[in-house]
Image (spheres, rainbow, N blue to C red):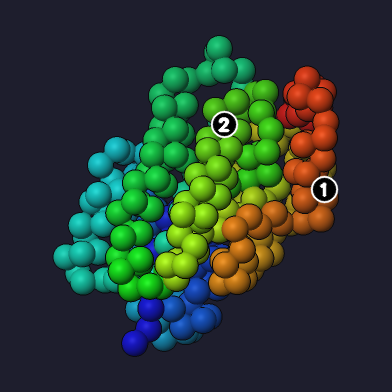
Amino acid sequence: MKKTALITGASSGIGLELAKEFAKSEINLVLVARSINKMQDLAAELKQKYNVQVEIIAKDLSELNSSKEIYDLCSKKQIEISYLVNNAGYCDFGNFATCNWEKQQNMINLNILTLTHLTHLFLPNMIKNKFGKILNLASIASFQPGPNMSVYFASKAYVLHFSEAISNELIGTGVTVTALCPGATESGFQVAAKMQESKLVKDKKLPSSKEVAEYGFNSMMEGKTVAIHGTMNYLMANAVRLTPRNLVLKLVSYIQNK
């Protein structure tokens, strides 16, 4: 019997490409995002091309009760989740003192609370079955503080540390947890965050969502705990450990500015 993967933020970018990777491997899907039209189109494509079952759930994951509603819906339909991909997330670009508080609160809800709650809900059954794989979308931002994107960087540091900690707790259970840490990616993410003019992305050739998704999928299947996409990103993430923190702050601030 085919196993099933649940992917949040599956309507575009890395989430959409991850859905294709799972479908290629003949793994059934539960796709979760706000945009039902995009998911319907993707579901139809994957069903026809790869002969997999695809359930779609239209849900705003920044709402605090959304994770329990998703879990209850899967339980009601007797869908057993063997792969959990916590991909959904967003950021806001700008000075914290003048930012929109509702956006920051929703970011914390989505990037941290929903990810953690979904993991807590689906993990016990994975342990019971002695099989499961969890992929949490962290970021190269996980390794340092980020002026002008302070809440986003902090939320991704949480994702990295949370993933590493429970990965260690799960040794010997048959369940693995992978924190995928991409750098800036061509995914529409920067447009949504209104950061197209920052030095980080302006006039840069960014890796595609497909490249990152392939790397993340393979890392998850291998059971890798921390997967940093790209050689330069790997070097930067590790260089931070040897660099004075005040200098790291100045460098990140310079890169993030327009």
Residue 65 lies, with reference to residue 3, above or below; the image says above
Between the residue at mark 2 and the residue at mark 1, the CA separation in whole angstroms equals 20 Å
Image quadrant containing the N terminus: bottom left
* Residue at x-position 35% and y-position 59%: 123
Tag 1 residue: 235
Q: Considering the numbered disc 2 on the image, is that residue within a helix, a strand or a loop?
A: helix
Residue at the left extreme? 76
Disc 1 residue type (three-letter): Leu
Q: How many marks?
A: 2
Q: Nearer the viewer, residue 114 or 238?
A: 238
Tell whether 191 sits left or right of 78: right
Q: Position of residue 121 (x, y in %)?
A: 30, 54
Q: Position of residue 251 (x, y in %)?
A: 81, 27
* Residue at x-position 39% and y-position 64%: 6
Disc 2 residue type (three-letter): Ala
Question: Closer to the N terminus: mark 2 or mark 1?
Answer: 2
Image quadrant containing the C terminus: top right
Tag 2 residue: 154
Can residue 25 be seen?
yes
Q: Position of residue 64 (x, y in %)?
A: 29, 38
Can residue 37 be seen?
no
Q: Nearer the viewer, residue 250 or 168?
A: 168
Q: Is disc 2 surrounded by few (<14), some (14 to 19) or many (20+) residues within 10 Å?
A: some
Residue 128 lies, with reference to residue 73, above or below; the image says below
Q: Which mark is residue 32?
A: none
Tell whether 94 sits left or right of 207: left
Q: Considering the numbered disc 1 on the image, is that residue within a helix, a strand or a loop?
A: helix
Q: Position of residue 105 (x, y in %)?
A: 41, 27
Q: Is disc 1 surrounded by few (<14), some (14 to 19) or many (20+) residues within 10 Å?
A: few
Tell whether 158 sits left or right of 231: left
Residue 32 lies, with reference to residue 200, above or below; the image says below
